[in-house]
């Protein structure tokens, strides 16, 4: 077994609230600087930037986990992690189809940019990625699991979280993990989190938001299958908060 330093909640320049400097090579520089071994890209309501980030991360020795952060109709953020990019993009397509049929004004809503491996901007997307989808919380979890993904309640100690929007973590699904943005707040939420696997990541939207790892994954390798086993605490594998 090894312990890998992980950051599973990062946004690219395609996320509406992220800085345009969140390009593959700039992001990976920060990950290497903070000694991160394993990272996930989780743009809001889209998976369009996964491929260039995967290539750049891997070239720097950072294992890549494809993901998405979906905003439900209840304004709850749910993270989804997938076995590979092809599957993630299929899920991302369904999430995009659940967005309102409008275009944003980049001057008001922010620039949403696709990028290549050289950090060159390729396109500006006008879909309303910063808006809630028409998917309910239950439908979002079901969609992620339909594509063999792992759903996680995002930043339960921040706005747009399941606790803030609903007042509690629903008892079902009982095996769904939760992300705690500030590990030091665990005692505040311990009653609701003690029976669940808990993540913690940077939720980086700009280059200054990166930090040393907030969690470690104890497992045999940096793969999706091993992550699933760590979440389920199989044969000594586990997720560990850095507190």
Image: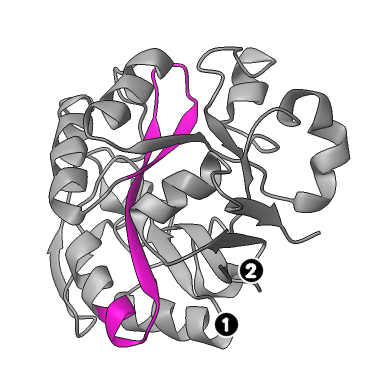
Q: Residue drawn 53% across and 25% down?
A: 175
Q: Is residue 156 above or below residue 61?
A: above
Q: Quadrant of residue 228?
A: top left
Helix, strand or loop status at disc 1: loop
Q: Which residue is mark 1?
A: 35
Q: Which residues are magenta?
A: 56-81
Q: Residue drawn 23% across and 60% down?
A: 50
Q: Is residue 209 above or below residue 178?
A: below
Measured Cα–Cα span from mark 1 to mark 2: 8 Å
Closer to the camera in the image, 37 or 12: 37
Q: Position of residue 172 (x, y in %)?
A: 53, 12
Q: Which residue is mark 2?
A: 213
Say whether residue 21 is visible: no
Say whether residue 28 is visible: yes
Q: Is residue 59 above or below residue 140?
A: below
Q: Left or right of 9: which side holds 164?
A: right
Q: Disc 1, disc 2: CB below 8 Å?
A: yes
Q: Quadrant of residue 242?
A: bottom right
Helix, strand or loop status at disc 2: loop
């Amino acid at each position: 077994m090894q312990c890998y330093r992980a950051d599973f909640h990062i946004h690219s320049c395609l996320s509406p609230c992220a800085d345009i400097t969140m390009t593959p090579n700039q992001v990976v520089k920060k990950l290497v600087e903070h000694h991160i071994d394993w990272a996930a890209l989780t743009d809001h309501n889209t998976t369009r930037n996964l491929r260039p980030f995967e290539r750049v991360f891997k070239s720097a020795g950072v294992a890549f986990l494809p993901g998405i952060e979906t905003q439900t109709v209840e304004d709850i953020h749910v993270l989804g992690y997938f076995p590979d990019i092809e599957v993630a993009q299929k899920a991302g397509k369904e999430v995009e189809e659940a967005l309102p049929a409008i275009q944003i004004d980049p001057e008001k809503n922010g620039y949403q940019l696709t990028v290549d491996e050289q950090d060159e901007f390729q396109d500006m997307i006008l879909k309303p990625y910063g808006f809630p989808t028409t998917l309910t919380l239950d439908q979002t979890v079901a969609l992620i699991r339909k594509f063999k993904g792992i759903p996680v309640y995002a930043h339960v100690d921040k706005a747009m979280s399941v606790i803030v929007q609903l007042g509690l973590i629903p008892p079902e699904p009982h095996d769904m993990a939760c992300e705690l943005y500030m590990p030091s707040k665990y005692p505040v939420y311990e009653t609701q989190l003690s029976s669940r696997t808990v993540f913690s990541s940077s939720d980086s939207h700009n280059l200054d938001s990166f930090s040393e790892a907030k969690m470690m994954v104890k497992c045999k390798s940096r793969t999706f299958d091993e992550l699933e086993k760590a979440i389920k605490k199989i044969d000594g594998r586990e997720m560990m908060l850095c507190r």
